[in-house]
Image (cartoon, grey):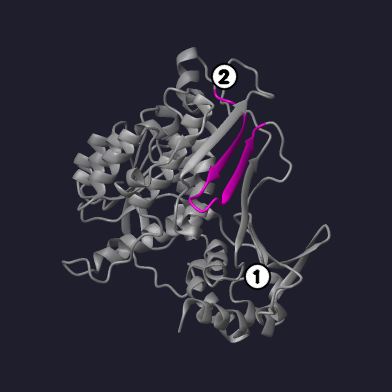
Amino acid sequence: MTTNDRRDFLLSTGAGMAATWLAPHLELLHPLLGRKTSGGEGRVKLALIGAGRQGRAILGELATIPDCEVVAVCDNDESRLSSALRRATGAKGYAGAADLLAKEVSVSAVIIATPTHLHRAIVEQCLEAKKHVYCETPLAHTLEDLQAISAAARGAGVVAAAAFQGRANPVYGLARSFFKAGTLRELAHLSAQNHKKTSWRTAGSTPERDRELNWHLDPKVSLGLTGELGAHQFDVFHWFLGRHPVSVRARGDLRLHKDGREVPDTVQAQFTFDDGLVLDWSCTLANSLGGRHEEIAGAMGAIKLAWTHGWMFKEADAPTQGWEVYANRQQFHDEPGITLIADATKLAAQGKLQEGVGLPYTSLYYSLADFVAAVAGSHGAGSNGAGSKAPACSLADGARSSAVSVLASRALVERTEVAIDPKLLEGL
């Protein structure tokens, strides 16, 4: 069967095939259902390094994930550490990662949620100690650090995951199934935005404390909006397309927060792929209209994704694909959107289709649950790793998407088009 024949078959098979596409995502959609929760010694013992805002959010999600237990938390700030330990009942506190790794021998996996520029040293320490690693993204703020992280992960013999959340998101996985089946046909345009009115600043009691808390506003150690916010969205397109752009140009400005910061609060970037396909991305801290979403437009339809929800839009001349009869429809101005719902066939039969709209958990939850499952699976794998479950996003894939963010930041600073060398990405 040729590629075109297979595509036409998938597009015309109907509801039965739709159910087949949906099936792989059901376990992730409700990861607490149908699982046996091990007690005590059977749980994955975790440590968290970095107890800032993201670290505390991670602790909140881990508390609802079965088969794992946070036994240690590390942060060099006493108040942050105390706050985190109140959330992680029974966990021990540490001021340094080396001390934690030396004393907590029962820890099998470490979650790293420190500022981006501190990731490299901690990832290297954890991998050297043969701990499974989940690292927040972007993985690093320089290409040199990304290369070092990838090198450390190669052959480490542990689960090494990057926290690009889209890859573990059930709605995104479902949308990607339709995309890979050729539903949209010839691609026309890609776009994404992250708009939220916020200062992106935390008040510090002293100038030193202010600099420490607002590291993401320091261009010496931060990729700014293109990295800290854009990287997750860029990775979604890399995952869907299976390739990376070959060049990027960007510009930015301070439109609202003229408080002495050097990092722009409003940025636009344009990524070009080898076939001329373009991704337009915008990000602002000055206005919230439209929020955060990604769009993929093709000759026969479009997909819109917004992290907890997803929709498909059909062109008037697109063939009927069968599964539409089970779909929940939502109007966007003059465009009818078909809501992406996992297990739509079953829910429709039960008259509960509306209950399937939106995800019951956050994208962070699914990403962490995927990592815990991968670590748990590795414990039962053979000596050659057989039977283990790969994480949704490896450190190598995470490094490549992070590298695109590094180069986008460079294009922003230099206000010029920057080439993205495929050989550079292949080497990560």
Mark 1 residue element: helix
Disc 2 is placed on an element classified as: loop
Per the model, the C-alpha gap separating discs 2 and 1 is 43 Å
Which residue position is annotated with label 2? Answer: 261
Indicate the amino acid at tag 1. Gly
Span of residues in magenta? 263-285
Which residue lies under the disc numbered 1? 356
Q: Is residue 303 above or below residue 56?
A: below
Q: Is residue 91 visible?
A: no
85 relative to 207 in the view: left or right? left
Residue 130: x and y in percent read 20, 50
Q: Is 200 situated left or right of 318 in this image?
A: left
| Residue 329 placement: quadrant | bottom right
Identify the amino acid type marked 2.
Arg
Query: Which secondary structure dominates the residues rendered in magenta?
Result: strand
Vertical order, 376 against 267 (above or below) = below
